[in-house]
Amino acid sequence: MNLQRVEASGGPKAGCLRGERTNMKRANTLLLGLLPVAVAVLLTGCGGGTENGGSERDSQTRAAEGTEALSVGALTKKQASTVLKLVDDICGDTWCEGDHNFHFDRIQCTRGCQSSPGKCRLAFRLFPYGSDLATGPTYPRSCETTGFTGFASLVDTAPNGYQSLNWQYYDALTACISELESKLPAI
């Protein structure tokens, strides 16, 4: 790069080298390019908009194929483990009585902020009875439920300490899992 002293009588670029002046222009352009993103984050308080281009496919539950991770979790490892156990316990009496077996891998939640509700994503694998996770076939899926923000919204705890899955969360999972099962290949 050919650096030459720029003659200027004053202002922020006075006495800059020509190469430095170009670098300053690039930095300013980059900052101006990031400005709309920063404004969107500040206005929404959560990173800008919804994942579906501004509309929710379902106000309560959005079934998602795949197991994308959520950002920072709102559950401790112990809480996540408790939720997974409760989901697995209720599964035997509900969804798991169908054509597929289930293995619940993880649950992650994010808290809501400002106008964006919190959400939880339960990642699991479905596999036909008579097969197993190691040999397959397995179908990784996840259920994303909006309006659930953490342990207290997923689990009801009785005064005596007994814990059960929150019925609203159970209903949201039932709708999501039913939708996902209907789209699986025939066995």
Image: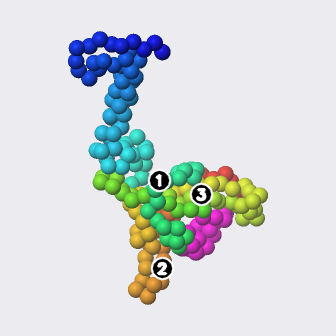
Which residue does the image show at 40% across and 63% down from the upper left?
149
Residue that carries the numbered disc 3 in the rendered image? 181
Looking at the image, tell me whether mark 1 or mark 3 is earlier in sequence order. Answer: 1
**Vertical placement of residue 81 versus 17, above or below:** below
* Residue at the (26%, 13%) spot, across then down: 8
11 up-or-down from 81: above or below? above
Q: CA distance from mark 1 to mark 3?
A: 26 Å
Amino acid type assigned to the residue bearing label 2 in the image: Gln
x, y percent for residue 4: 39, 12
Q: Position of residue 41 (x, y in %)?
A: 34, 44
Drawn side of residue 12 relative to residue 174, left or right: left
Residue corresponding to mark 1: 71
Residue 131 visible in this rendered orientation of the protein = yes
Q: Residue at x 26, y 23 (%)?
A: 12
**Residue 140 versus residue 107: which sits nearer the camera?**
107
| Magenta residues (range) | 84-104
Question: Tag count in the figure?
Answer: 3
- Report the amino acid beneath label 3: Glu
Q: Is residue 169 visible?
A: no
Within 10 Å of the Cα at label 3, are there few (<14), some (14-19), or many (20+) other Cα atoms? Answer: some
Q: Secondary structure at mark 1?
A: loop
Q: Which mark is in front, 1 or 2?
A: 1
How far is the residue under mark 1 from the one under mark 2? Answer: 26 Å
Q: Which mark is residue 163?
A: 2
Of badges 1 and 3, nearer the viewer stands 1
The amino acid at mark 1 is Ser
Question: Is disc 1 surrounded by few (<14), some (14 to 19) or many (20+) residues within 10 Å?
Answer: few
The quadrant in which residue 146 appears is bottom left
